[in-house]
Amino acid sequence: MSTTKVGLLGFGTIGTGVVRNFQRNASIMQQRLGHNIQLVKIADLDLETDRGVQLPPGVLTADVEDVISDPDIDIVIELIGGYEPAKKFILKAIENGKHIVTANKALMAVHGEEIITAANKNDVSVMFEAAVGGGIPIISAIKENLCSNEFSAILGILNGTCNFILTKMTEEGSDFAPVLKEAQELGYAEADPTFDIEGVDTAHKIALLSALCFGTTVDFDHVYTEGISNITSVDIQFAEQMGYKIKLLAIGKNHGNQIEVRVHPTMIPGSYQLAGINGVFNAVRLNGDFVGPTLLYGSGAGMDATASAVMGDVMAISRDQASGATSRVPIMGYRADQIKSLPIKAMSEIVSHYYLRFTTIEKPGVLAKIAGCLGKYNISIQSMIQPEGDSVDSVSIVLMTHSAKEGDVSSALKEIASLDIISQPTCLIRVEHDLD
Ligand code: HSE
């Protein structure tokens, strides 16, 4: 029976999960493949820490060359994360004829083209299911199971840390900082948690998913990215009163000659399935023209769920290899010569409903001035809350608008900010009703 030999770069949380999966389910994998997969080398600078797993002598090494230049190794799993040295190691491994499995969303979202071009040139595969949605098989769903569909939209809750924080803030009224600390202790957050809370991690993921769904390159620099660090329990409570939940939503939409790719806190009606995705769980809602709306849900972060996605990719490559194929399914789901370069719609052009919370002084005519400015820019008010009992220099006026163009909303808010009635910056949260 043949054996696929695998090397691993990075023996951290996910790397440990990969070892556990190899060790516990080796016979299941063998039964499914008809051949063996063996983890032969693991490279990490830290040779001391006890990860709670036993390795045969000689497997762990501090020298990355023992993995990327070992002629016996077929597949290199990269779990170092970040741009460098991960990119350098991956490119060298590709040059050496290794297939790559990576969980590195930052690298694939920003430098994916370079890596994929190198892989195609060297006739090796690159798979990255673990880069998006932890254990949820969203990438293979887009590339394989749903590949006869044209996708109009993809919306996702793609960051477990943010969803965990927003859920706890909503359900328990907790403050932001201690909940972030808890998420870090549970191993959900990135090494630099600002990538989580400022939406960058989510932006990497939706850039990849939009590219896969719409058959285009996505210029990551043009993905609008706003995180949850300015979300307060005040807005969570007003959202609840109006029947909405606040989620960090990743949005990809296909308009034919251009796409929308954006990440920001978003109010969604409490009755929608995405509003009920809580804790560290992730979910992705895809809309395909034949399959219709489809929701994939599961663990979006953590050792074992992410290891499951890594190992699924390792097994897929191993199967291809056993049948003499490489990238039977193209790396980005479309044949390389068919991938377009669609521009991303400017934020000023997007159309949405808006939640606006103004903090004003208390005096006659304040509401009229705000409504007048909004009206001037063609923004229609759908509903309003003005709670009683605020102090005279700090009155909350909460408005929900009908559909409006973001450029008009920005102009109106700029004009309102210049009025002498505003005592604190206005809070804006986009509202998504139309999930198609
Ligand atoms: N930091 C990420 C999250 C891990 O919180 O979802 C998975 O990419």
Image (spheres, rainbow, N blue to C red):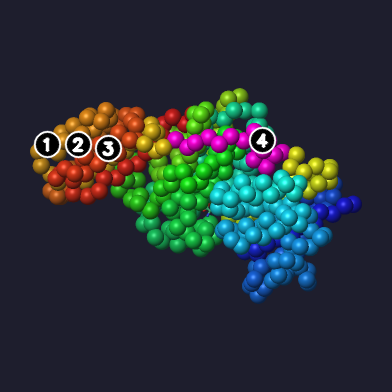
Please report contact status of discs 1 and 4: CB closer than 8 Å, yes or no.
Answer: no
Q: CA separation, marks 3 and 4?
A: 42 Å
Q: Residue at x 80, y 42 (%)?
A: 325
Which residue position holds label 1?
Answer: 365
Q: Amino acid at mark 2?
A: Ile
Label 1 CB, ligand 1: below 8 Å? no
| Mark 4 residue element | helix
Q: Is residue 336 magenta?
A: yes
Q: Which x, y percent locates residue 403? A: 34, 29
Is residue 164 visible in this depiction of the protein?
no
Which residue position holds label 4?
Answer: 337
Q: Which x, y percent locates residue 172? A: 39, 52
Q: Nearer the viewer, residue 128 or 83?
A: 83
- Mark 3 vs 4, N-terminal side: 4
Is residue 338 visible in this depiction of the protein?
yes
- Mark 2 vs 1, N-terminal side: 1
The crowd level at tag 2 (other Cα within 10 Å; few <14, some 14-19, many 20+) is many
- Mark 1 vs 4, N-terminal side: 4
Which residue position holds label 3?
Answer: 411
For residue 47, which quarter of the picture? bottom right
